[in-house]
Image: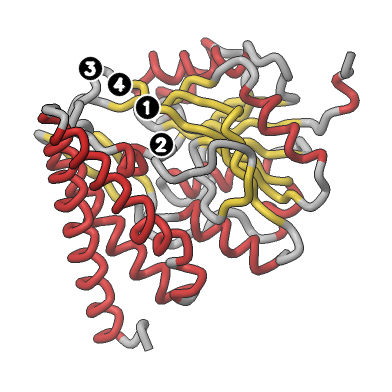
Amino acid sequence: MVTRAEHNTISVLVPAWNSKRRDELATCLGAIERQTLPAAEVIAVIDHNPELLDWVRETFPQVKAVANAHERGVVGARNTGVELARGEIVVLTDDDTEAEPDWLAGLESCFADPAVVGVTGELLPSWSGAEPTWFPHEFYWVFGCSYAGLPSEVAPVRNPIAANMAVRRWALQEIGGFRQGVAPRQIRHRGAVVAGGHALEDTELGIRIGRQWPQMKWLYQPDATVHHRVNEEQATLGYLLRRSYEEGAAKATLAQTVGSQDGLESERRHLLVTIPRGVLAGFRDLLRGRPSGLGRMTAIVLGIGAAAIGYAGASLAGLLSGRGK
């Protein structure tokens, strides 16, 4: 039997900001408590919301609840947690996730290889309503979930997903955590915020760590699973197009910052291999009399178009400002 002493110690960081999502935060923290491999500490970083901070401290006294000590937004909250973490491995998730019981064990197992600097796990959408049959799996990234084209077994990847990732603490702290200074974005639906965060902060972190320690690698671990909440407002074509546009613009900015070779490496394969497969699968379903196939094909084409427009606009803006030189 494997004893706890044979594992790396783990600090789990959970940023939160919205008092209306208390139930989801409670579900998240409860799932972390029930892990087969316990965390050494769980740090809930509350982003400029004293009322929510008091609630977490009262409801979950075993959790280290602290206020975001940096700029407003999830990047500042995560960096606050990174600075306080004491575990050998820092695990990050969001307040609207629910981890399966062996989540931490799955992530931690990859660090038996000393060449592994970080791990990202599987994120499955947890639909608040019925899953739309037309929504393409190739675009699950708009929810921050695992998408078609990712490995089906443990394998190296470039892009970690911050809602389910683990990093060696020394590397995360030495690199300076997530890059700050980028204003958080918000996506609204009928006046309510349905999503928010920073553009590609996890991808940029992964690239920066990879450049700093090129002899080390990131892994994708499909056996470390969390379920990520997807609201009905997010399961719409309008949301897909808005997120695709923003993603395209963010990719252009990332390419201007780190170079197109690193900034677009994974995207080229997704565009040239995964996307055509998705269109072909939709066409096959259409031929079999399944209307959802046409819906998926249409959504893929429109999503790619929106991303291309966002990329082109941001690239032009970068050239005009001198960033794209």
**In the picture, which quadrant includes the C terminus?**
bottom left
Say the numbered circle drawn on residue 125: 1
At label 4, the amino acid type is Trp
Residue 276 or residue 99, whichever sits in front = 276
Residue 67 or residue 41, whichever sits in front = 41
Cβ–Cβ under 8 Å for marks 3 and 2: no
Query: Can residue 82 be seen?
Result: no
Cβ–Cβ under 8 Å for marks 4 and 3: yes
What separation in Å lies between label 4 and label 3 (alpha carbons)?
5 Å
Give the residue at x 16% y 29%. 288
Say the numbered circle drawn on residue 127: 4
What separation in Å lies between label 4 and label 1 (alpha carbons)?
6 Å
Q: Is residue 88 above or below residue 60?
A: below
What is the secondary structure assignment of the residue under circle 3? loop
Mark before the other along the chain sequence, 3 or 2:
3
* Residue at mark 2: 145
* Residue at mark 3: 129
> How busy is the neighbourhood of tag 1: few (under 14 within 10 Å), some, or many (20 plus)?
many
